[in-house]
Image (spheres, rainbow, N blue to C red):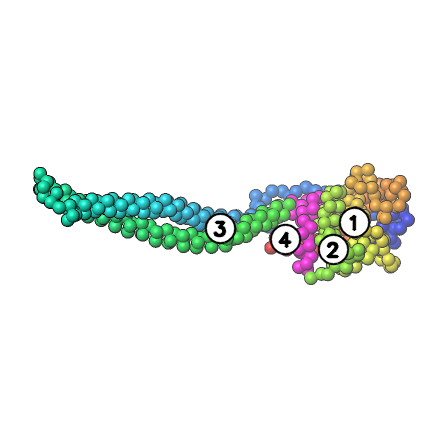
Amino acid sequence: MDNSSHRRRSNRHRRGRRVAQVLLTLTIGLISATTGFAFVAAPATGQEDPDVARARERLEQTQTEANAAHDRYQKVVDERDQVQGQITALEQAIPELRAREAELRLQLSIRAAALYKNTDPTAGLEVLAAKNHIQAGRRTKLTEAADDFDNDRARQLREAATRLEQAQLDLEAKEAQLEEVLPRLEQERAVFDQKVAEANRALEVAEQIGALRALGEPVMGPTVLSAAEMVAWYRSSGASPRLSDGMSIEELAQIFVEEGTAENVRGDFAFAQSYIETGGFRAGGSDNNFSGLGACDGCSGENRFPTARDGVRAQIQHLRNYADRSSRASDLNDPPSPYWYGSDPATAVRNFDTFFAKGWAPIWQMMGHGNWATDPNYASKVTGVYNRMIESRQG
């Protein structure tokens, strides 16, 4: 790989002034010729990007399914609430019926006692001595009729209360069934809500990636994939990392996100670059060098960095130098890497600001052929990995 440090340049960077000037002239011409492709969005065709369209359709379908799950859940909740309301009403009505029945039974008992008293043989001839024997008989008949009526009412109240008690038991059984179903429906609803969130995220990724591709896959720009999404793809690739200091691939991916965001360099694309450079992060981990900085054709060894963050930071800063013709050390989020541009701060600033290939590769398609690597297929390899990362994310 290349080295911008004046003390540690690789063989391909040790070019004569004349060769550098020729290459610079050719590259400037190439950038000028491809400026429209690299930085200007493609003309509108009236058609949505296919990936975006698919993501949008998937989102709409998932939202429909989620709405149906919510409706199923709410229907059961409403039915349970209705059953609970009916049970509450029965719990109030049944005691009232029982109380009315008891009241009638009491009245029957009182009238029975009174009737018995009026017809008590020990009363002697008091009844016969009554001025109006007919009236006494009528009173007895009316009392018996009232007893029959109230007794029938009491029976009806008892039967009604019994029916309501059975209805209450049935409703309580139904309530138990609904309560048993609700957790499953709630889980189903949560699953679909998660699917909607994932579909929303897929659409967001598709839209951002589509916009970046329309710009020709620039080196600089937002880091679209999260650390978790990069790691999910990495795990699916079957690769196994060899990192130093107990560093996990999850932690390393997060460093790419943070360092890329800090310099407005696409950290997820840098992760793809490192995947190519390290053979799936199986190499470079002991040196915390994930991008071949300091390596060159025909020489052994490469730069060592004390921590993984130092290695990623140097990579991100160097990518910015390749991509941004106006990049200056003063614009960096962090000082130029002392492990790449020079341990002396002033020297590091000067080496960063005077990097001879500054702005030579604003888009990833310009990498290779001497830009970062000599491999003419370098750009397609890195882009291929990145595309697989995106395709994996899009499902």
Q: Write the residue at 86% across / 57% down.
A: 301
**Residues at marks 3 and 1, CA–CA distance in whole angstroms:** 45 Å
Is residue 218 a member of the stretch shown in magenta?
yes
| Badge 4 density bin: few <14, some 14–19, many ≥20, Cα 10 Å | some
Sequence-earlier tag: 4 or 3: 3
Sequence-earlier tag: 1 or 2: 2
Identify residue type, mark 2: Ser
Helix, strand or loop at mark 1: helix
Residue 225: give x, y in percent of width and height: 67, 49
**Label 1 close to label 4 by CB (< 8 Å):** no
**Residues at marks 1 and 2, CA–CA distance in whole angstroms:** 12 Å
In the picture, the quarter occupied by the N terminus is: bottom right
**Residues at marks 3 and 2, CA–CA distance in whole angstroms:** 38 Å
> Is 365 left or right of 115, judged from the image as shown?
right
| Badge 3 density bin: few <14, some 14–19, many ≥20, Cα 10 Å | many
Between marks 2 and 4 in the image, the one whose residue lies nearer the viewer: 2
Q: Is residue 21 above or below residue 274?
A: above
Q: Which mark is residue 248?
A: 2
Identify residue type, mark 1: Arg
> Is 266 left or right of 297, judged from the image as shown?
left
The residue wearing badge 1 is 309
